[in-house]
Image: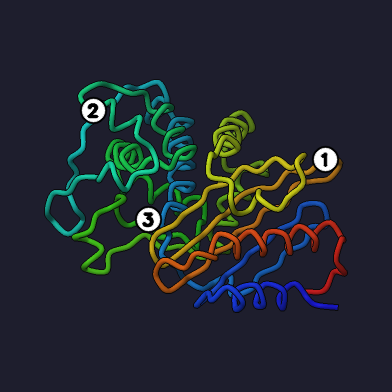
Amino acid sequence: MTSLSERIRQSAEAAGARAVGVALYDYQEALPFALDGDRWFHAASTIKAPLLLAVYKLAEEGRIRLDDTLHVRNRFRSMAGGIYRVSPARDGDSEVHRRRGRSMRVRELARAMIVRSSNLGTNLLLDYVGLDEARRVLKEARMEGIELRRGVEDTEAFDQGINNEVTAEGLARCFRLLCQEGFVRAETREQMIEVLCAQEFNGMIPAPLPREARVAHKTGEISTVCHDAGIVFLPKRKPYVVAILTEWEEQIEKRQGCVAGISRAVYEYVTGKEGRTT
C-alpha cells in the first residue's frame, strides 16, 4: 500500500518539481497531515487569500466598508522606495484595468482579486487598508506561515529580496478560519467562501475531483512556483482543507497536472478510496 506521503513525492518527482509542501486538515475525521508543511515558498497569488481575510475582517470591525468606492489608478509606491505599475499583460484580469480613472467598490475589487486574480485590484485594496493593518489582522489570526510584505509586481522590492512568502501549513490555517467559529462571524465566512468558490482558474485542486465537489480556493503561479489552496466541500461529509505548494525550474509544462495529481491523491486518502496510510 503506497502512503500519501509517497504518492505526493512520486507525483512531484515524476513531473520534475524541485520542492513540494502539502498541508491537509480533514474535518470529517479531525485528521491533520503535512509533508514539508513548514517549508517557505514564494507566495505568488495565493497571498490574495489572506488579504481577502484581512479586508473582510476590517469591514467586520467597522474600519472600512465593503461598499466604499476607490479610485482605480495604476501607480504604487514600491517597498524598495520607487514607483511601479501593474502590467496589464501580466494580469489575470482585464476589467479592473479598463476601469482606470473611474471608481470600484471594495467588494468588487476583492472579488476580482480572487475570481480572476486581479493584480491591480490586489494593490488597490492593499493600499487602501494599509500593509500594517493587513499584517495586524493576520497576526491577530495567529497566521504563522504567512508573510505579507509588499504589493504584487513590485519588481524593485523583488530584486532586493522583499517577497510575500507562505508555507502550506500557513495557507491551510487561513482557510481553516473560514470553516470554524471564532475569528470572523458566520455571515462573513459565508461571503468569503462564496467569492472563493467563484474562482475561474480550476485546473489544479478541483480538476480531478468529482463533479459534485465544491471548492473554495486560490491559485498562485509565477515562473518558478505553482500553488493551489482551499476548502473542498463534498456531499454527505464535512469538508477538508488542503494547501499544495510546488517549486520548479522556469516554465515546466507539467506543473498544474502535478498539483492536480496531488489533489487526487489527497481526495482518495480522505474519502478512503485508497488505504489510509500517511
The local crowd at label 3, few if under 14, some if 14 to 19, many if 20 or more residues have their Cα within 10 Å, is many
**Residue type, mark 1 in image:** Pro
Q: Count up the numbered dots.
A: 3
Residue 176 vs 236, above or below: the answer is below
Kindly check if marks 3 and 2 are in contact, taking CB atoms under 8 A apart as contact: no
Amino acid type for the residue under numbered disc 3: Leu
The answer to whether residue 226 is left or right of residue 152 is right
| Depth order, front residue of 174/212 | 212
Q: Nearer the viewer, residue 34 or 54?
A: 34
User: Which element is circle 1 on?
Assistant: loop
Residue beneath the point at 84% across and 45% down: 237
Badge nearest the viewer, 3 or 1:
1
Instruction: Check disc 2 and report its element: helix, strand or loop.
Output: loop
- Quote the CA–CA distance across marks 2 and 1: 42 Å
Residue drawn at (43%, 52%) of the image: 45
From the viewer's perspective, is 215 left or right of 43? right
First in sequence: mark 3 or mark 2?
Answer: 2
Mark 1 Cα shell of 10 Å, populated few (<14), some (14-19), many (≥20)? few
Numbered label attached to residue 148: 3
Helix, strand or loop for disc 3:
loop
Q: Which residue is mark 1?
A: 235
Q: Report the quarter where the N terminus lies.
A: bottom right
Under mark 2, the amino acid is Arg
First in residue order: circle 3 vs circle 1 = 3
Q: CA distance from mark 3 to mark 2?
A: 25 Å
- Circle 2 sits on which residue? 100
Contact, mark 2 vs mark 1 (Cβ under 8 Å): no
Distance (Cα) linking label 3 and label 1: 34 Å
**Numbered disc in front, either 3 or 2:** 2
